[in-house]
Image: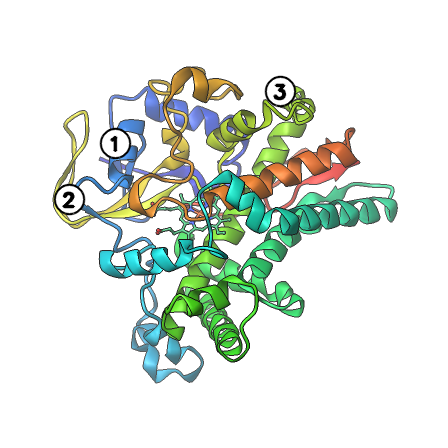
Amino acid sequence: MYHSVPFTEPGAYEPSVLASYYDSLHFSDLSTILDKRTGMHAVWRYDDVEKILNGTDPAVSSRNTLDPLTPFPKFATHLKAIPHIAHLATVPKAINNAAKATHTTVMKAMFARPRGLTLRPDSTRTNFGAMINRRAEAAADALAAAAAGTSGAVDFESVVARPLASGSISELLGFPAEEEGRIKAWSDAHVALLARIIGRRDRVANIRGLADLSRGCRRLVAARAKEPAEDLASHLLAQGLAPKMAASALMTVMVAGYSSSFGGLLNSTRYLLSDEGREHWDMLREPERVPGMVDDILRKETGVVAWRRYAEHDVTLAAGSVVPKGSSIFVMIGAANRDPQRFPDPHAVLPERRENNGTKPVTFSAGPHQCAGREFAKLAITTALTTLRDRFPDMRLVLPDNGIGYAPDYMLRTPQSLPVVV
Ligand code: HEM
């Protein structure tokens, strides 16, 4: 049956509109729909989503996760013919859409001690805590300076969320400070290709942006091959990854880490400063309740509302419906995180929910491809929120009457601005 996933329509990501849409999915008799505009089969029930993501169903693969949502125009399928983007044809699949053996090798290098990413809160803090604290304080300084220079509202998106995410991800990877400004353009180009239905002109511009991102990562790897430093680029080379593979891995980490982090921070901040979230804003001062609370805010307010998988064979869902072989599956993480069968009172933030309930949200996916930066992301977002609460206890939203506007993305829920006064 044909339907339209509404995410790219104006207002669809507004909190109350999104909540009603998720309710309508969960209270319907269906468990999959065919999205008219993209041809993807959407799946939203927690049990289906978790099983499709967790890698145990041999009918499902990850081979399409980084494909462009709007297929490349014909000229770009002959990448080698166009000098500026020719080298994209030589970018190996390294992580999210790679074959199992390559994925295993790259992730082993990514998680190797001492400088790799880690999935333990204590070692994440040891490796990255000082940098994250310094970046959060700098973001708070920038907010204070912007507020001092105006009698009106300050845009939290451009003053805090974006620079904080691009600064910490570029420092993690090893980009010098002067390149930080470029990360927005590079990552936005990649995200637009992945998550947006775009016309020919935008596709061309974004393919060029993707090529710039790839070139930037290759430049960094080449520099670190000559002169290693304390960063992820040097670490991947030291673990024996070939330079092209290391550069491709860095591309994924940068885009996965940047856009999801600032989207998550924006959605969380919007919730915390709203009338219903205010008690949790104040709860940021109760350290023992903060981890559970941030976990549940990210469950409800995740910026990554969907991801993709491919049906290598017919995929049978829990209720018996079938997603046919050869389909792209639109895996609705945000909806699964609000499945009332698994998360009673799904639109409420309950800091003790996980302890009481035990169901793990799929915010960071599940199985072998689950987010490699999840501990980094949780530490970065928690540190940002607690720092901001300490520095600006009276911060509040100044929402325009016509809403704040969200990027027209299928898979990422990202406010385009967030006016606040402090
Ligand atoms: C709140 C912030 C974040 C959210 C919600 C998030 C969520 C996700 C999701 C849903 C996936 C897809 C996994 C799949 O295909 O099953 C993913 C993959 C990934 N993420 Fe994150 N992420 C966040 C932040 C980060 C950060 C900060 C980094 C890096 C420092 C990062 C690195 C990655 C990588 C490398 C992958 C690919 C993993 C693989 O295929 O094995 N993410 N993330």
* Residue at the image point whose x is 48% and y is 36% from the top: 302
At numbered mark 1, what does the secondary structure look like: helix, strand or loop?
Answer: helix
The residue indicated by pointer 3 is: 276
- Residue 199 visible in the picture: no
- Foreground residue among 96 and 319: 96
* Residue at the image point whose x is 23% and y is 56% from the top: 100
Asked which colour scheme the image uses, the reply is rainbow
- Residue 165 visible in the picture: yes
Q: Is residue 133 above or below residue 319?
A: below
The residue indicated by pointer 2 is: 59
Residue 277 image position (x, y, % from top left): 62, 23
Three-letter residue code for mark 3: Glu
Spatial separation of the CA atoms under disc 2 and disc 3 = 42 Å
At numbered mark 3, what does the secondary structure look like: helix, strand or loop?
Answer: loop
The residue indicated by pointer 1 is: 48
Spatial separation of the CA atoms under disc 3 and disc 1 = 30 Å
Q: Is residue 123 above or below residue 72?
A: above
Residue 92 image position (x, y, % from top left): 32, 69
Dot 2 alpha-carbon crowd within 10 angstroms: few under 14, some 14 to 19, many 20 or more: some
Residue 210 image position (x, y, % from top left): 45, 67
* Residue at the image point whose x is 25% and y is 33% from the top: 32
- Foreground residue among 315 and 365: 365
Three-letter residue code for mark 1: Asp
Dot 3 alpha-carbon crowd within 10 angstroms: few under 14, some 14 to 19, many 20 or more: few
Three-letter residue code for mark 2: Ala
On screen, residue 137 versus residue 30, left or right, reads right
| Mark 1 sits near ligand 1, with its Cβ under 8 Å away | no
Q: Is residue 178 above or below residue 222?
A: above
Task: Tell me, yes or no, whether the two marked residues, 2 and 3, touch with CB atoms within 8 Å.
Answer: no
Q: Residue 181: name its quadrant.
A: bottom right
Task: Tell me, yes or no, whether the two marked residues, 3 and 1, touch with CB atoms within 8 Å.
Answer: no
Q: Residue 391: name its quadrant.
A: top right
